[in-house]
Image (tube, grey):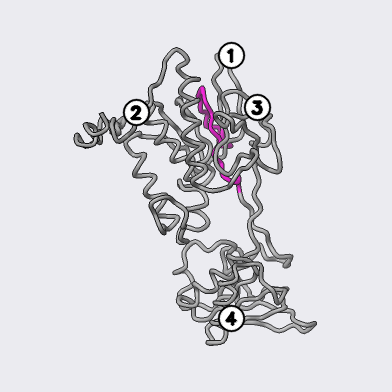
Amino acid sequence: MINTDILIIGAGPTGLFTVFEAGLLKLKCHLIDALPQAGGQCSEIYPKKPIYDIPAFPEILAGELVDNLMKQIEPFQPGFTLGERAETIDKQEDGTFIVTTNKGTKHRAPVVAIAGGLGSFEPRKPPIADIVKYEEHGVEYIIRDPEMYRDKDVVIAGGGDSALDWSIFLTDVAKSVTLIHRRNEFRGALDSVEKVQELKNLGKIELITPAEVVDIIGAEKVEAVSVKRNGDIFNRPCDHFIPLFGLAPKLGPIANWGLEIEKNAIKVDNSLDYQTNIPGIYAIGDVNTYPGKLKLILCGFHEATLMCQSAYQRIHPDKRYVMKYTTVGGVEGFDGSKKEAPKAVVKAIE
């Protein structure tokens, strides 16, 4: 049995930042995530894509943001159960919760913080016979490492931002890039559409619209795709076929925990602490919903901060916590390390 103060379900940016805020309150955290590494979508789906709305960072790669968060929480020594999905939750007579994973690992905590992002993701696959046969053999639904496509012939299908952005990016990596969309109009940002058109005019992207991929050709791996356009079918040789039709989020087993759900998100009380309809269980980040909700990483950070204050009062009902700014008190880790606030700053504040 793994015991902790706050059990965090989801090790994305919001879950990781929760560890820092809880650590300032001397609360220990343990995180569960179905992915084999921390970072959530930032690590699994778009580690190389830039993020522009993180305070103090005009631009930061998603993977770098995760690395920074991991470094920030290191002094607080969080525990991790990775590669396992939180399956069931049971409330005990003493008010604590026991969360069991799909692999049978049990965790006990007085507070559970669900920071599962948009939940687990499943790619929206095109209706192509035997496409599963080619998965990991030339068919990818997510681009994790662009270098995988170095000097390869790549066909991308889709009309949204991901299809446009990766088509643009891979022109400097792949041997050839072909973008196929079933309509002449795209759903992505106008500047991306214009950039694709410019690259097409320069001969760096082959743009085929309106058209769709209807079959995959190859014995053991992708060798070509069959493209249907204006009733005609022709083959386009390629090494990789990447259908980017988006990812469908699902809450998974959490949806069966008795929580109040609205449009695949968990309803919370945002007037105070982001608690769910079950006392002691909170939901923060993209997984929750409330009036005026914005699904932004920085909003998840804010929610995590207030949630930790509430969690402290729940765990220590007889104690009164007096908030101290880190510029005054510094940051003291569980490992005995401490980052002292500069004396000049402390004196000026006093």
Q: Which residue is mark 4?
A: 197
Does the image show residue 221?
A: no
Marks 4/1 in contact by CB < 8 Å: the verdict is no
Above or below, 181 relative to 96: below
Which element carries disc 1, helix, strand or loop?
loop
Q: Amino acid at mark 2?
A: Lys
Tell us which disc is closer to us: 3 or 1: 3
Q: Residue at x 51, y 54 (%)?
A: 44
Magenta run includes residue 119: yes
Which element carries disc 3, helix, strand or loop?
loop
Tell us which disc is closer to us: 2 or 4: 2
- Sequence-wise, the earlier of marks 1 and 2 is 1
Disc assigned to residue 93:
1
Q: Which residue is mark 3?
A: 277
Quadrant of the image containing the C terminus: top left
Q: Position of residue 64 (x, y in %)?
A: 39, 54
Dot 4, crowdedness within 10 Å: few (<14), some or many (≥20)? some
- State the separation of the CA atoms marked 4 and 1: 64 Å
Q: Residue at x 60, y 74 (%)?
A: 193
Q: Amino acid at mark 1?
A: Glu
Q: Residue at x 64, y 53 (%)?
A: 122
Name the foreground residue: 251 vs 297. Answer: 297
* Residue furthest right in the image: 231
Q: Which residues are magenta?
A: 101-120
- Sequence-wise, the earlier of marks 2 and 4 is 4
Q: Quadrant of residue 239?
A: bottom right
Q: Position of residue 259 (x, y in %)?
A: 67, 31
Q: Which residue is mark 2?
A: 324
- State the separation of the CA atoms marked 2 and 3: 30 Å
Name the foreground residue: 141 vs 53. Answer: 53
